[in-house]
Image: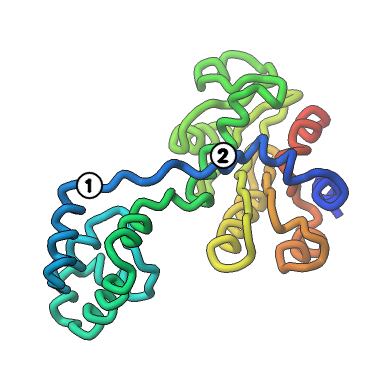
Amino acid sequence: MNHWTQLSIDFANQRNYLDELFSVYPTIPEGIRDIDQALWDKAEGLFNEQNNIELLKVLLKLNLFPIKDSYVAYLKRDNNSIERNPNTVDRLCGRLYEMGLEKIYEKCSEPKETNRQIGPLFRRWLNRGVLGVKPVSLEEFLSNDKNAILDAGDAQMMAFANEHLNYTHEKGLDFVGRFNGKYVIGEAKFLTDFGGHQNAQFNDAISTVKTNVDAETIAILDGVLYINGRNKMYRSITEELTEYNIMSSLVLRDFLYQI
């Protein structure tokens, strides 16, 4: 098994992994969502009138619809379908009336889900200088050969990697660095659960680490994939992907200074 993958598994299973990981991904829920007051006032009136079609149209304009239902996304993307599907409209509105206005407001103003907030957190962690160097602009990054981390947006990181490192993969990068004269690129993901979207996130990072470029490639992965023997991700990193540098953000610093 890859040495850095093994270290990551050991850390996750023998130490206070989640406590330490919170410094990288402090997934604190945001405050309640703001609700457009004019839309809400209109929704209240339509609710009291029990005008099903117009009530649904107004609530679908809010950032968060108060009911989780498989048919809501379709109605939101094709507003004309509301008039064509009266049974679906009545079914959803029946649930709304059962909830009541207070509960509807509460649901519409819920904070964003945690896993939708974690994207920028890895870069914020880097910007604290935790790897021993502060991320720098592209101009400074190119000005010398010192240890450095590139501080840039997705497009600029990809452009740099394409021009200087022969990177042609379509996926964006979360990390571009240079340590001991070697370039290092990779993606960072916090995999909070098993299944659908999380598997896709895992596969994205693996496809990047497999790319053939003029740099060391890494997959900076954290979360459930290190739970010993209980999931497909774990089997992949311990049995199939052993030649690749797959590691937790918590061992990244040690990896960078030894390459």
Q: Is residue 112 visible?
A: yes
Residue 13 spot, x, y in % from top left: 84, 52
Kindly indicate the quadrant of the structure image that contains residue 199: bottom right
What x and y, as percent, mark residue 175? Answer: 60, 36
Residue at coordinates 35% horizontally, 61% vertically from top-left?
Answer: 103
x, y percentage for residue 63? 30, 53
- Judging by the rendered image, the residue that carries numbered circle 2 is 174
Locate the N terminus and report the quarter of the image it occupies: bottom right
Is 197 drawn above or below residue 38 in the view shown? below
Question: Which kind of residue does numbered mark 2 sit on?
Answer: Asp
- Residue 97 percent coordinates (x, y): 26, 72
Residue 3 visible from this viewpoint: no
Task: Work out whether 220 lies above or below 202.
Answer: above
Q: Are marks 2 and 1 in contact (CB under 8 Å)?
A: no
- The residue to which callout 1 is attached is 36
| Residue closest to the eye, 70 or 210 | 70
